[in-house]
Amino acid sequence: MPFKPANNIQDLQYFGEFGGVNPSISDSSTYTFLSAKTMFDTFEGNADGCYLYSRHSSPSNLYLGEALAAMEGTETANVSASGMGAITPVLLQLCSAGDHIVSSRTIYGGTYAFLKNFIPRFNIETSFVDITDLEKVEAAITKNTKVLYCESVSNPLLEVADIRGLSQIAKKHGLKLVVDNTFSPLSISPAVLGAHVVIHSLTKFINGSSDTVGGVVCGTQEFINNLRNVNDGASMLLGSTMDSLRAASILKNLRTLHIRMQQHSKNASYLAEKFEADGLKTVYPGLKSHPSYELFKSMMNPQYGFGGMLTIDVGTLAKANELMELMQKRNLGYLAVSLGFYKTLFSAPGSSTSSEIPEHEQKAMGLTDGLIRFSIGLDADIERTYQMMRQCMVELNVL
């Protein structure tokens, strides 16, 4: 049977305390025990079903975590207060001083900054490679390598990782494959393809309303237990804890993710095809011109399409800024970072979400000044949106 992530979410059933169709929100920071012995056992990790302190876990966070684990096909999951609050503990849990990471060169700027600038303080080094070239990936592995790190669809260049191929390399060398799936929830299921750990920024498509930040780590029960361990668990000790009210809110939004992703993908595919036909340099995984089009097709859950992200290149940063300002003025979206909102969001990543990457490295990876990253919204009349965007481009001599 094919993996159907939305079915797994739909099949979850959580009753509220008084029979509510939504689970009750546990708005507590600490929890009582009927006996001192139970408290001791909970501290030691030997008391199932008992809650200790909300930095460790809470009922509301566990409801959301289990739903996300079901979506990704992993044993369990741990939610955090941000996407970076998910990424950083995973890497610190898997690596110690003297260890090495092989990472995709095109990743979210915050992740790049952590790997490039912060984690070397702990004598953990990273090699950044073209993740689409499996030979280069394997050549970068050393005797100290512990982790292969990539994004299913990279930010912002929309390169597609061959997760099956990377999984084989990881298995051959005894490494952990960690995949950030923020750009492609439901469309790609990395754990099913061989990833050991799957990460999301819940801030983006999964929450979908740009009103909170959050993250999740999906993996084995053993690994999540290690992250939560009161003595040496990176998630527990670094303290990036999601608030119970936010967890409950994201869980409600998760239930409509399958509908939203279908519309995001439908709209993005329409615009990408139109922009390419107009002669714009357009990158979208659903275009046959994309170098990884067939790879994406071979990995995807087809009913959710190729995602809601696309890029165009208008030549210069000045022209990109001019176009984005005009599109915002015409109510076509917002000049803003992030993604997954009901309105289209656009930004020039070289000077925003990827600004942590030095200019010479941006150029080496193909991140140009004129690149505009679009997170396509849920527009009901995407043809009207296209015509209005095209008019903006004509007025500014982009077309």
Image: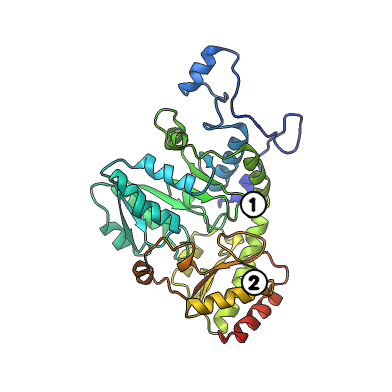
Quarter of the rendering containing residue 381: bottom right
How packed mark 1 is, by other alpha carbons closer than 10 Å (few <14, some 14-19, many 20 or more), is few
SS for dot 1: loop
In this rendering, position of residue 10 left or right of residue 126: right
Amino acid type of the residue that numbered disc 2 sits on in the rendered structure? Gln
Using the image as rendered, state which of residue 50 and residue 331 is in the foreground.
331
Amino acid type of the residue that numbered disc 1 sits on in the rendered structure? Asp
Q: Quadrant of the C terminus?
A: bottom right
User: In the picture shown, does residue 312 fall above or below 240?
Assistant: below
Pointers 2 and 1 in contact (C-beta within 8 Å): no
Residue 137 pos. (x, y %): 31, 59
SS for dot 2: helix
In this rendering, position of residue 349 left or right of residue 242: left
User: In the picture shown, does residue 347 fall above or below 323?
Assistant: above
Q: Which residue is mark 2?
A: 328
Q: Is residue 128 visible?
A: yes
The residue positioned 52% from the left and 56% from the top of the image is 188
Disc on the earlier residue, 2 or 1: 1
In this rendering, position of residue 257 left or right of residue 166: right
The residue positioned 48% from the left and 45% from the top of the image is 86
Q: Which residue is mark 1?
A: 211
